[in-house]
Amino acid sequence: MGHAIELKAADGFAFEAYVAQPKKPPRAAIVVLQEIFGVNAHIRAVADGYALAGFLAIAPATFSRVQKNVSLGYSAEDVTTGRELKGRAEALPAPGVMADVQAAVTHASLAAKGKVGVVGYCWGGLLTWRAATQLSGVKAAVCYYGGGMTLAPELSARALCPVLAHFGTHDPLIPIDTVEAFHVAQPQVDVQVYDADHGFNCDHRGSYNAAAAELALEKTLGFFIDHLQL
């Protein structure tokens, strides 16, 4: 369904993004932010799903500044590689990959008359929180199990748009007590918790939880419909 395009950040850096077009004119645009596994088959399928729901979906390759064309699976070796790439990306001088996320948001805004939401998974969930607290043009944001967003310094950031955040009670990477602390510190954020593990939305992983994924998607689509004024 989708195809690759090249985007350019404000500093001139060029990077690839996967774009999925709806069959009819888009009701709005959704920027889809990857896990630590790159814009792989799962992230492309997520983008395709938003296109089927009527959204223009854009998934920028946020590892591009440290390594291009990353598309990993979910083996132990892939996890190690993904974590190493994330570490390198996080170590970039500011604004780092957020410049590329901003470029994707800006591109999406032009295509969807300013109605742009951002959704992200795992590392992408953290980047989505940063997009909600730092970037211009983001009208609504949905974070799926964003590792690090429940801890300092992210804990004290303030969102510039409505935010929905999905977490799992059995997530060893995001202890539930930190989720509760985040909820207290961020009462304006719609925090949803599921009887699920980290990565519960990804049907390529052993932690996939179909019931939680379906409910979270229902809430996510409703949230975007409400806050993008569709």
Image (tube, rainbow, N blue to C red):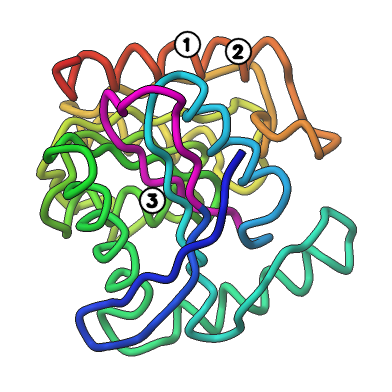
User: How crowded is the residue under tag 1: few (<14 C-alpha within 10 Å), some, or many (20+)?
Assistant: few
Q: Which of 94 and 117 is in front in this view?
A: 117
CB-based contact (under 8 Å), mark 2 and mark 1: yes
Residue type at mark 1?
Glu
Label 3 sits on a secondary structure element that is loop
Pointer 1: what residue? Answer: 218
| Quarter assignment of residue 135 | bottom left
- Mark 3 is on which residue type? Met
Give the residue at mark 2: 214
Query: Which residue lies at the image location 49% right of the left edge and 36% below the top edge?
Result: 144
**Which one is closest to the eye, mark 2 or mark 3?**
2
Q: At x 35% / y 86%, what residue is drawn?
A: 13
Which quadrant: the C terminus? Answer: top left
Label 2 to label 3: alpha-carbon separation: 23 Å
Whether pointer 1 and pointer 3 mark residues with C-beta atoms closer than 8 Å, the reply is no
**Secondary structure found at label 1:** helix
Badge 2 crowding class, 10 Å Cα cut-off, few under 14, some 14 to 19, many 20 or more, is few
Instruction: Tell me which label, 1 or 3, sits earlier in the chain.
Output: 3
Q: Magenta residues, as a range? A: 19-35
Return the x and y of residue 145 as percentages of the image width and height.
Answer: 52, 39
Q: How many labels does the image show?
A: 3
Report the disc number at residue 149: 3
